[in-house]
Amino acid sequence: MTNKVVVLGSLNVDTTLHIDQMPKPGETISAKSKTNSAGGKGANQAVAAARSGATTSFIGQVGDDSNGVFMIDALKLDGINTAHVGISQDEGTGSAVILLDSQGQNSIMVYGGANQAMKTEMIAESQALIESADVLISEFETPQEVTYEAFKLAKQHGVTTILNPAPASKIIYGLLEVTDLIVPNETESATLTGIKVNDTDSMDQNAAKFSEMGIENLIITVGDRGAYYHTPTGSGFVPAFKVKAQDTTAAGDTFIGAFSSQIDKDLTNIEEALIYAQKASSLTVQRLGALPSIPTAEEIKAEYN
């Protein structure tokens, strides 16, 4: 089965500065090189889903500028439906500056631009698209109010909703009630629950806290260690594949997009989908850039046949 995946999210032009090590407060350092590429959490997730075989569509917004054209063209290269990407006349296309050190770790600064100027009215224009989806993904680089409207519509039509609460911030009232699965990383999970993630017991405590908040299905990604999952029928931990990382920028987004391409609407195959997502992200971190690093289904199969 090929999932129909809709991503409601951000479109950013990424500028990556390659450095030896992260600067200290007040320190000026020199970058070894600079690269520009298409990115944004939403774009990364959509491309990951598409390259893993999902029929993928995008709901988002760019500015009326060359970067906006660049981002739409980048999505189209992977066969992603961009008919629901709006154009803002008031805000420029989103952008991000990524500091990438020699160990493959990164720090990211994001300018929201047109992403943050999205309005809830856009969801009514995308109603038919959302109703026909199997999975709807969103994150916090676009307004939560827009996600809430989209998720409410999705739940009326049996669409599985996946929330990536990144960057972590207070979740608006009602959003978790229409979320089927929440996927934070360990830092985001701790921010939202107040419980630091450092072992399986603390992950279980995070799951219990999320349950109190109204969400029963949880995945916590913990970088090169793997991913924890919890549902009403069980919990477990799927280890990551051990590789030498060059760039972790798109690892989490690749994980979510690849996962969405495989997951059944009732989440019953969650462990199998997680293993596939770990394979995808393990290839991503061995390459440079955001979109350019995301593997295809064929590449994943060839590496882990």
Image (cartoon, rainbow, N blue to C red):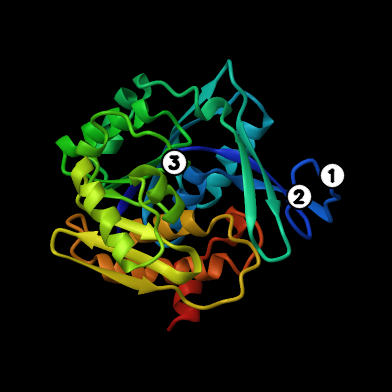
Horizontal side, residue 44 vs residue 26: left or right: left
Per the image, the residue denoted by label 1 is: 28
Mark 2 Cα-neighbour bin, 10 Å: few <14, some 14–19, many ≥20:
few
The percent position of residue 135, horizontal first and vertical second, equals: 28, 48
Check contact, mark 3 vs mark 2: CB within 8 A.
Answer: no
The percent position of residue 107, horizontal first and vertical second, equals: 64, 49
The kind of residue tagged 1 is: Thr
Per the image, the residue denoted by label 2 is: 23
- Residue drawn where x is 42% and y is 56% of the image: 186
Per the image, the residue denoted by label 3 is: 168
Sequence-wise, which precedes: disc 3 or disc 2? 2
- Residue drawn where x is 65% and y is 67% of the image: 246
Above or below, 8 relative to 79: above
The percent position of residue 295, horizontal first and vertical second, equals: 52, 65
Question: Looking at the image, can residue 268 be seen?
Answer: yes
- Residue drawn where x is 36% and y is 27% of the image: 146
Mark 3 Cα-neighbour bin, 10 Å: few <14, some 14–19, many ≥20:
some
Check contact, mark 1 vs mark 2: CB within 8 A.
Answer: yes
235, 303: nearer the viewer:
235
Q: CA distance from mark 1 to mark 2?
A: 7 Å
